[in-house]
Image (cartoon, rainbow, N blue to C red):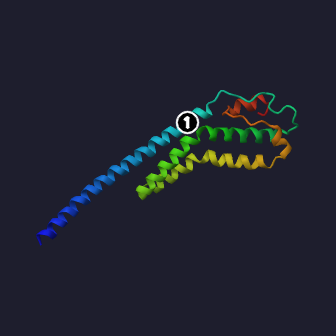
Amino acid sequence: MKELFVFFVSLLAYSAFASESQKALISEAFNNFNESLVALEAQESHCSMSDRVLDANTFSGVKLSKEQKLTIIEYFYYDTLLECSKEALGQFLTQSTLLKSIEPDFLNTTEQANRLVISTNIAHLKAKHQFDNLDEHIKKRIIKPSEPFNLLMTANILGLN
């Protein structure tokens, strides 16, 4: 009987420890989630605040409608923006998945945050769909920028406003 009592006391002590350990684990996961969200927001802000604009000659030699030009610059904008922030986005999605795996009570919180941060991905997907509908000869003649650029300033320079 004494051994059973010691077992139950040990089990209770372990449960209390596991509970504190679990709380610490959840707290760390939640902090990592928050830090990765802040880092992602900072990176996306940095990427989207570019002063770079596409050259006024971007479409020279290619006959395009205003809508086609808008489609191209919108796709390039989102594509370069995602490329610039993909590491921070990957880190955030990893931390989000970890948090909801460790503590399912955070499922709603992580899902809401995920929907917010993937809005750029959704806009990119829509822009890509429009871009993919352009003729192949047009897409081959336009050089995709390698860095993020200011969408509004570029639209003004290209006379697309």
* Residue visible at 75% across and 32% down in the picture: 155
Task: Give the image location of residue 106, x and y in percent.
Answer: 43, 54
**Splitting the image into 4 quarters, where does residue 105 fall?**
bottom left
Task: Give the image location of residue 57, x and y in percent.
Answer: 81, 28
Q: Establish if 4 lies above or below 19.
A: below
Asked if residue 28 lies left or right of residue 117, the reply is left
| Secondary-structure class at tag 1 | helix
Few, some or many residues within 10 Å of mark 1 (<14, 14–19, 20+): some
**Splitting the image into 4 quarters, where does residue 144 fall?**
top right
Task: Give the image location of residue 33, x and y in percent.
Answer: 45, 46
The amino acid sitting under disc 1 is Gln
- Nearer the observer, 87 or 115: 87
**Splitting the image into 4 quarters, where does residue 6 fall?**
bottom left
* Residue visible at 33% across and 54% down in the picture: 22
**Total of numbered circles in the picture?**
1
Q: Establish if 136 lies above or below 17.
A: above
Mark 1 lies on residue: 43
Asked if residue 28 lies left or right of residue 42, the reply is left
Quarter of the image with the C terminus is top right
